[in-house]
Image (spheres, rainbow, N blue to C red):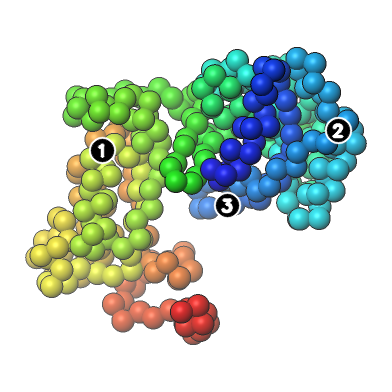
Amino acid sequence: MTEQLQSVLRAHLLRLDGQEDVCFASWHPSRGLARTTGLLHEPILPRNGDRKVHGNAEIMPAYVERAIGAALEKGTGLAVLHSHPNGFGWQGLSDDDAQTEARIAPSIQAATGLPLVGVTLAGRTNTWSARIWRRTGPRRYAPTFCESVRSVGRRLSVSLSEDRIGLEVGEELDRTVSAWGHHVQTELAHLTVGVVGVGSVGSVVVESLARIGVGRVVLIDFDRVETINLDRIVGATREDASGGRLKVSVSARVARAGATTSGFDASEEPYSVIEERLRTSHPGNRRWHPPRSAQTTWNQAR
C-alpha cells in the first residue's frame, strides 16, 4: 500500500475509544516471476449503519454489498481490514476473525473473480498482517498468510510474518546491527532490491547492498563488459572484457562473494527495462535496440 493510504486506514481503524473497527478497500493483483502481490488501492470506509462497534466490530450485509458494488465498478478485488488496538506484532486469526472473513469470502470471490484479502492492524506496534482466502472446496475457503505487508512512500515500511522474523546474524554484521538494530537487519535480509544498470554506479550499489545484508538483488542490464569499462565497474577483470562477459554476471559474482546474509541470492536478468523477458538466453548484443513499437512509445513520451 502507499504511505498515504496507510495513513487513511490507520486513522480510521485506530479509534480514540480503543475499540476495534473495520473497513473495506479495493485491491489489484500483481504477479511476478516468483511472487504474487496484492496492491491495496482505495479505501471504502463505512457509513452510518454499515457496522456495529461494541468492543469488536460487526459488518452489516448492506456494507458488504456496497463494497462489492464499488469493486465491480472499478474492476478490482476486495480486502477487509480490521484493527487489534492492543495487538503487538504480526497478528494471527482469532475464531471470530476467521469466521467473519470465511463467511464473506465466497460472495466476494464469486462477485469480483478475485479472492478476499484479509488485513489486520496491531495498534501497539503499528504492524500489519495479511492473508488471502483461497477456495479449497464447495463454499469452503482457507487463509494463506502473506510473507509481508509493505507501505511505500517517503520511506519503506515492512511488516514481516512470524515465520520470517527469526534471523541469525553473523559476526561480520555486529557493527551494522549495533547501528540500527536487529529488527531493521531482519527487514533488510528479507528485501529484494532491483538495480537497473550495473555499470559505474550500479556495480558499487550492488556490492554495498550485499555487504550490508540485503537478502536478494535483481540485476538488470543487457550490456557486456568492455576494456573501457575496467576503470569503473567493481570487480570487472581483463578476462571479463576479453570474453565479453555480461555485466550482470560480473556484478552477481562480486555480490555473492561479499554477501553477509546466509541464503543471499543475486538474480541475473540480461535485458533492457523495455524488453520482454525471453525464455531463452539473451544474446547480449551491444547494438541491441528496442522494438519499433517501444521506440515509438518512448519518443512520444519524451
Tell me which amino acid carries mark 3: Arg
Q: Please state if 194 lies on the left or on the right of 9 as rendered.
A: left
Q: Label for residue 276?
A: none
Residue drawn at x 57%, y 34% as measured from the top left: 146
Q: Label for residue 48?
A: 2
Closest to the observer: 300 or 131? 300
The local crowd at label 1, few if under 14, some if 14 to 19, many if 20 or more residues have their Cα within 10 Å, is: some
The image quarter containing residue 178 is top left
* Image position, residue 130 (x, y; %): 61, 32
Residue 53, relative to residue 212: is it above or below? above
The local crowd at label 2, few if under 14, some if 14 to 19, many if 20 or more residues have their Cα within 10 Å, is: few
* Image position, residue 18 (x, y; %): 67, 17
Residue drawn at x 38%, y 48% as measured from the top left: 193
Residue 197 seen in this snapshot = yes
Q: Find numbered disc 3 in the image and state the secondary structure of the residue it sits on.
A: strand
Residue drawn at x 81%, y 55% as measured from the top left: 73
Pointer 3: what residue?
31
Pointer 1: what residue?
212
* Image position, residue 226 (x, y; %): 17, 72
The image quarter containing residue 11 is top right
